[in-house]
Image (spheres, rainbow, N blue to C red):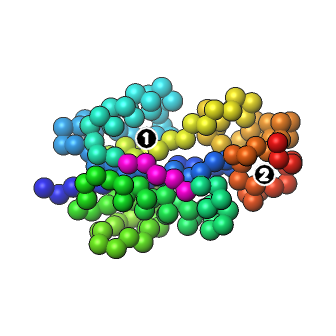
């Protein structure tokens, strides 16, 4: 039986926190029609589906830290998180489908990139759903913007300052305020 893993990352464009990646091998019994691009789902629906996916698949989540992002760069850190998630899977997939156009370097694994894979491939959609970041800093609205540089988030940085979770080398964080 061919085991297909889907892989996606979250937080690449964020101004805060680590970058996370998830790898998912769906059980054959899972209802693939429920799985959609996580960006098109409400937060509540994502939470419900994340539990469903975790109960009906083999999955792993991994991250690359803020310091790894700032030392390497966000692309390399994203690929590092993907590799870590893949290697944490309890089963070895026959093929790994990765959202985007870049692949991590992993020996003895068959990898294929799929542009907009989170919209096309159920296992990548599932990985996207369970990888979502939810840091709880109410003043910065991370529950809604996931750390991305929205107007509200940038106003909060100006008002409350840069936290330990912010990526200080990222623009506009490095231009806005001093750390708190």
Q: Quadrant of the N terminus?
A: bottom left
Q: Residues within 10 Å of mark 2 (few under 14, many from 20)?
A: many
Q: Residues within 10 Å of mark 1 (few under 14, many from 20)?
A: many
Q: Kindly tell me whether residue 148 is visible in this rendering.
A: no
> Which residue occupies 67% across, 62% down?
70
Judged from the image, the secondary structure of the residue bearing numbered disc 2 is: helix
> Which residue occupies 57% across, 36% down?
134
Q: Which residue is mark 2?
A: 173
Instruction: Point out residue 133 in the picture as x, y percentages from the top left corner.
Output: 55, 41
Extreme residue in the left direction? 1
Sequence-earlier tag: 2 or 1: 1
Q: Quadrant of the C terminus?
A: top right
Q: Are marks 2 and 1 in contact (CB under 8 Å)?
A: no
Q: Which mark is residue 159?
A: none
> Which residue occupies 81% across, 55% down?
174
Query: Is 63 included in the stretch rendered in magenta?
Result: yes
Q: Which residue is mark 1?
A: 130
Q: Is residue 133 above or below residue 87?
A: above
Instruction: Point out residue 155 in the picture as x, y percentages from the top left corner.
Output: 81, 38
Instruction: Point out residue 73 in the picture as x, y percentages from the top left corner.
Output: 63, 66
| Magenta range | 60-64
């Amino acid at each position: 039986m061919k085991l297909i893993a889907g892989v996606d990352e979250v937080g690449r464009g964020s101004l805060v926190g680590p970058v996370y990646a998830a790898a998912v091998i769906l059980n054959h019994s899972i209802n693939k029609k429920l799985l959609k691009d996580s960006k098109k789902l409400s937060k509540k629906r994502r939470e419900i589906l994340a539990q469903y996916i975790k109960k009906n698949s083999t999955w792993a989540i991994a991250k690359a830290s803020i310091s790894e992002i700032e030392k390497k760069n966000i692309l390399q850190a994203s690929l590092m998180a993907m590799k870590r998630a893949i290697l944490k899977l309890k089963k070895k997939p026959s093929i790994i489908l990765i959202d985007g156009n870049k692949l991590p370097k992993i020996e003895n694994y068959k990898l294929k990139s799929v542009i907009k894979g989170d919209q096309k491939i159920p296992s990548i959609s599932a990985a996207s759903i369970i990888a979502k970041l939810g840091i709880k800093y109410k003043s910065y609205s991370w529950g809604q913007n996931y750390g991305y540089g929205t107007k509200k988030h940038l106003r909060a940085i100006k008002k409350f300052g840069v936290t330990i979770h912010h990526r200080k080398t990222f623009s506009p964080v490095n231009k806005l305020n001093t750390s708190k």
